[in-house]
Amino acid sequence: MTVDLRLAATTAAGEAFVARCEKHAEDFATRAAAHDRTGEFPVENMNALVEDGVTAAPLPPEHGGTGLASVTDLAAGISRLARGDAATSLAVTMHLGPCWSMSRSHRQALLRGDTVAAERLSLLLDQIGREGCMLCGAGTEPGTHTRFPQTEARRVDGGWLVSGTKIFVTNSPVATIFNVFCRVRGEDGGWQSGRALIHRESSGLQLVENWDGLGMRATGSHTLKLTDVFVPDMLMTARGEWGAWSVPELVHSSAGNLAQIATYVGIAEEARDLVRGVVTTRRKAPSGRLLSERHAIQTNFARIEIAVATARAALERTGRAWDDLLRRGDDDIALSEAHDLMAEYQITKQIVERNCIEAVDVAMMVSGGSGYFNTNPLSRHYRDVRAGPFMQPFSPLELFEYVGKVRLGVEPDVDL
Amino acid sequence: MTVDLRLAATTAAGEAFVARCEKHAEDFATRAAAHDRTGEFPVENMNALVEDGVTAAPLPPEHGGTGLASVTDLAAGISRLARGDAATSLAVTMHLGPCWSMSRSHRQALLRGDTVAAERLSLLLDQIGREGCMLCGAGTEPGTHTRFPQTEARRVDGGWLVSGTKIFVTNSPVATIFNVFCRVRGEDGGWQSGRALIHRESSGLQLVENWDGLGMRATGSHTLKLTDVFVPDMLMTARGEWGAWSVPELVHSSAGNLAQIATYVGIAEEARDLVRGVVTTRRKAPSGRLLSERHAIQTNFARIEIAVATARAALERTGRAWDDLLRRGDDDIALSEAHDLMAEYQITKQIVERNCIEAVDVAMMVSGGSGYFNTNPLSRHYRDVRAGPFMQPFSPLELFEYVGKVRLGVEPDVDL
Amino acid sequence: MTVDLRLAATTAAGEAFVARCEKHAEDFATRAAAHDRTGEFPVENMNALVEDGVTAAPLPPEHGGTGLASVTDLAAGISRLARGDAATSLAVTMHLGPCWSMSRSHRQALLRGDTVAAERLSLLLDQIGREGCMLCGAGTEPGTHTRFPQTEARRVDGGWLVSGTKIFVTNSPVATIFNVFCRVRGEDGGWQSGRALIHRESSGLQLVENWDGLGMRATGSHTLKLTDVFVPDMLMTARGEWGAWSVPELVHSSAGNLAQIATYVGIAEEARDLVRGVVTTRRKAPSGRLLSERHAIQTNFARIEIAVATARAALERTGRAWDDLLRRGDDDIALSEAHDLMAEYQITKQIVERNCIEAVDVAMMVSGGSGYFNTNPLSRHYRDVRAGPFMQPFSPLELFEYVGKVRLGVEPDVDL
Amino acid sequence: MTVDLRLAATTAAGEAFVARCEKHAEDFATRAAAHDRTGEFPVENMNALVEDGVTAAPLPPEHGGTGLASVTDLAAGISRLARGDAATSLAVTMHLGPCWSMSRSHRQALLRGDTVAAERLSLLLDQIGREGCMLCGAGTEPGTHTRFPQTEARRVDGGWLVSGTKIFVTNSPVATIFNVFCRVRGEDGGWQSGRALIHRESSGLQLVENWDGLGMRATGSHTLKLTDVFVPDMLMTARGEWGAWSVPELVHSSAGNLAQIATYVGIAEEARDLVRGVVTTRRKAPSGRLLSERHAIQTNFARIEIAVATARAALERTGRAWDDLLRRGDDDIALSEAHDLMAEYQITKQIVERNCIEAVDVAMMVSGGSGYFNTNPLSRHYRDVRAGPFMQPFSPLELFEYVGKVRLGVEPDVDL
């Protein structure tokens, strides 16, 4: 009889979400190795998640969702999903993050009586909830930082023409709408930040299926080429000065951000359980004792436990802090508060990713050689879990500076 | 405008406790350096805590307390107290732990209708709540592990004669009752574990005031010599086989254990704030910029933030897990569950202590030389925070093995 | 104008060896990625090394070698070779180690006038030097520790019949003689340790080509199945009690051991140079500065330098200590001295492997995403460098205990 | 029978130096605790070193020295001296560094036939060799970096008037000549770097005996106040642009730099031996086994061994690299080479200091509580060893940037 110390939901909608994720994980696990080998995107997994309503969970009930608002709960579910297939888990967070953000925007528009915005968002939410539309962020570019996209939107009649190249576009094989970070000329001639929602079938959009990563091989993180893709006005949002921070930007990325790192917690837990299974059943000569009877196995297993516990605790505490802040509307949150929690997220990202990498690394060591075989899932976990630190915002190259600046009261612009 | 990310209370009783601790911390801070220098026990601090009801907080209201039952809240308060004076904070946890435990025992005795036990505990609780009686654990001995005390209780008419030597008896200068871990001969001739509550003025009790530590200098962690000290039957409790585990033993140590490590969180937070104050106000040639403008200061400050956040998160999550378990009575908790959470505590102890040591160490580095002066509180924090890993249960020499055994399903007896 | 701080030779024979290794590395580099992808053994590389006399380097000149005796120099050469292809480098050490050992045995036999042994070894040395015969260790087995082989040799007329299974038999695709660790019944009925030199074409020998590792994919570390393989007396050496230590065993593994970890130094150096090339030529928006101008790139690059310097220093110092000890004959070395340097090797193995893993990991981070692509050699280095800790003797599961025991004067038998 | 793996001399002069250091260490050890307690400078130790010729070792024989030129050997000796008393060891390096530098300058002046410089240096060398004159660096100032002194020298008739404040002036209690880093106005009005040799009895010199450190308490690292102190022309050296690097500056600091960190190696070795003594003789209940028989003691002792081995290896390898470079004259060394080895020194400084801190920290843990007492030398080692990272050049706040810049080919000016 043990105590369940996994990440857990804090709301009823969250509990349902977590339960569904857990159920699918079992199924996904049967295909994870095959997808990793070929790099083929797990379309069947995504379909299952859509059919079961998992991808619609953050939507309001009237749009086909469950109103899942807690980012802690979202992350808890993702950590369970990642137990089965980390690539699917990571890919679906690319949808769930923006889906949660749109749902929040819609809720706030209703509250402040902005019926135009609410109506516009309603249409999008319906596409997701009723038609199974999948979202996907397209932020990263070669040669620049995510916050300073070179992808450009030029004004034309009734909308914009967007051109540029995006890489690491995770979830692209099934995405129907891409959320493209771009820049536009402001009226004063300076650059403004923009977000264009671009439909998959748009003319000028080309998906170059070139993803071939060390790990996370089935995430379909391909390259997206955009050449004068037309985007109507209602699907382009201005976000203020190019590269500048804003409360909505910081606050609305919280769900996706926390879900993203929850994937690594799931991987670490899986590696822990896998190696636990080995050492509690395998005996070795000359003593013939169970490996779990050996002191070195015990003490190194404790190191895995410490790493897993650290990751869970950091993630959960930051999730709760965000949930507290998110009870307020975006307008009631100060920029300094948003930065403060974004800094706490970056701290958490570093803690979670490094501890999950450590957990898998020590699990490899405890596995004693068998884990180094490609046929052993541990070797996949070892490759997958290393993806974390590359992901935005921020990589470790930037996050220490950002955190230091925010917490020392210095203007939080990373020197890029 | 920032977000308060400190450890916080989860109940009303806890909020009152935390607020009082915070208030006293400000006062204690004015004397901390002096007590550290001389090693004199801060009697005036303890008196203030008694007078203000802080030391009675866990008692039921009818005994003068506030019914503080949440171990998370207890730890939160202690972390605030430690900001002012870590030695006082550590010393008072030696009282608060057993005080909380007696209150829990009393509550459970009432619930199961054991009026004899309830009555006996009532007397003790009254001594604490009405007379300001101070408790103090006396577990550690030279030459053995805490779980295997050599201090012996021999049966005599109406009670026991206890003899032995205890070291590191923190809080001894003001303790009026010592909770002495001992062993007694069972009827079958084997050793049994016992706990004797020994009054300070008992004949045969000698306090050797020899505490002279690297840090935690004002905790009065002296040596206690017991020579045929008489203990009446009602103040001696048997605890089963010598060195054996039991649910009550595991469960009732939770409050003291968590409070103990909360002290180090407070130290780390204090070091962080201290160095933050320095680098945001000090300028250095040749550039004349504020130190906080320097990249190396920012990134290393982020390391402090990461360490502090890790410690807080681990402590809080484990506190909440204990609070959940503690909602059940001791009889409704399986030994394996108690071990599971004790293992989680040990994991947390390691995380908290190592991260708090790291936080202070990096703070030293960021301080740039001035922190190495004895006149700078950082040098005290550096010495104080290193005490953690020595404290029971367990030191790092044992905790990895214990955690590994518990989590691998191996009999959790550390090889001593 | 910089200072060359790479591992370097200390003797003339060593300098020639290092120069040859460096030359081949350039060539091997052109094929490394292809071999990694397919897992095909780099036979052409091995042929080139044989033809150029690299595999014969440790042999005495009269047997076609260069008398390379310094283990420091051997390791230096291997570190250069690994820059081109780590798999080839690791595979060839499996030959060079035993080749060096036989050459040393031969030299010592001559010195002490043991003409029988010298003659017997002469034949073997000739096979290597004149016929290009390749050696290969076969120590590891599933289900037991290398020191306690279950592979068994039974006495028959004129020799032995050997049966058992060996795994991780690196270099097996080209090996012509396998050095098989086995056990034989002693006259008293107890187990004795034995080493059988088994020719590839022996009846009953089957190579199962099942190597499919996370990294080191082209090392051909297949499974070797032996079923009643006949070994003539002159190719079987008894090594005393099963699992017992001996001076020759400890001393004669030094060359192979040091060469083995030198491979990881080469990988780390390669990763460092690769990422150096990227950051000193690549510019990124918004600033357009070279990446090497960024503080975070600089400070993290310093971390790589620290890791590389640590690995080199530890390897070189231990190499020199071995070279000093090896100036004496095996008979003039005390078992405690041999253990002392074997412990220093284990220490060095841990330092080298962990620092090389760290160097590649940080290089990945500095590479900023591109390193995670399978097309980037960094991702191969990341997989290859992780092989180190699995390799014997010892894995980290055993080495801490061994080192502790040796250095505390406790009988150095790891608890297996 | 074990192998001696301590840092060792590579020349005859070095061997004599190391032997003398070792002899004195035994004597100094008897007084180290007392000096630590009171903070009193160990004048008697310094006198013994002067009398025995240790402080004159780097001087040419004709000036009373032994011509000790190898920085590896100097460091080896200091590591032995530190075993007895780290404070004395650190203090004497403040003399030995400049003494070695002057001897090198003198040798080079003779070689290039610069009789004026040779003559001038001869006088100084005689003062050291014949009169027991003690040197001492005075570089650090509050409010600026060592490379940018605010202490100013103003031109007057026949010399200069120097004013400013220096802190951390280690060895000041016995120094007879202070080597003061200052700045002077150049002819173009810009700042130039200068070094003034100031006699202790100079008018306007005031030593404020305010050193009260966490550790290294007996180093006499007081504050030096200079008010219009007259320095004759022949004792003032210009060093080019204020804050600029030069080959001589980089090269001539090598001896003192390496000796400085050798002190920490000695501390770590001492802590290791101390704890080894404890665990190999002490038994604990309930098992009564020697502590050294426990697995956790063994594996953690191995961690100490690893840390010590790492520190030794890094120090020795860098020492040898410097000795190689130093075979050339200053004029034959390119600035980029000098930076390259200075970067290697900074790398080594970080490796040595962090590993020695780690060694003492783990030793504390293995000591099991007794090491936390002020009466146990371990607690002193814990405080002393932490001094390293504060010392110039550079603290960790600067060294990562410096190393990164040098090794990436970026102008190596740390952003201050």
Image: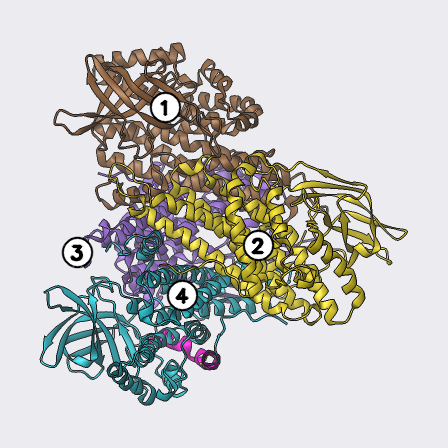
Chain colours: A purple, B brown, C cyan, D yellow
In the picture as drawn, the residue positioned furthest to the right comes out as D157
Q: Is residue D119 left or right of residue B299?
A: right
Residue highlighted by disc 3:
A288
Q: In the picture shown, does residue B269 fall above or below D87? A: above
Q: In which quarter of the image is the C terminus of chain A?
A: bottom right
CB under 8 Å between discs 2 and 4? no
Instruction: Report how far apart the C-alphas of labels 2 and 3 lie in the structure.
Output: 58 Å
- In the image, the segment drawn in magenta is C13-40
Q: Label 1's element?
A: strand
Q: Label 2 amino acid?
A: Arg
Question: Which chain does tag 3 point to?
Answer: A
Which numbered dot is residue B347?
none
Residue C137 at x, y percent in the picture: 28, 73
Spatial CA span between label 2 and label 1: 63 Å
Q: Residue at x 42, y 36 (%)?
A: B388
Label 1 crowd (10 A; few <14 / some 14-19 / many >=20): many
| Residue visible at 53% across and 22% down in the picture | B23
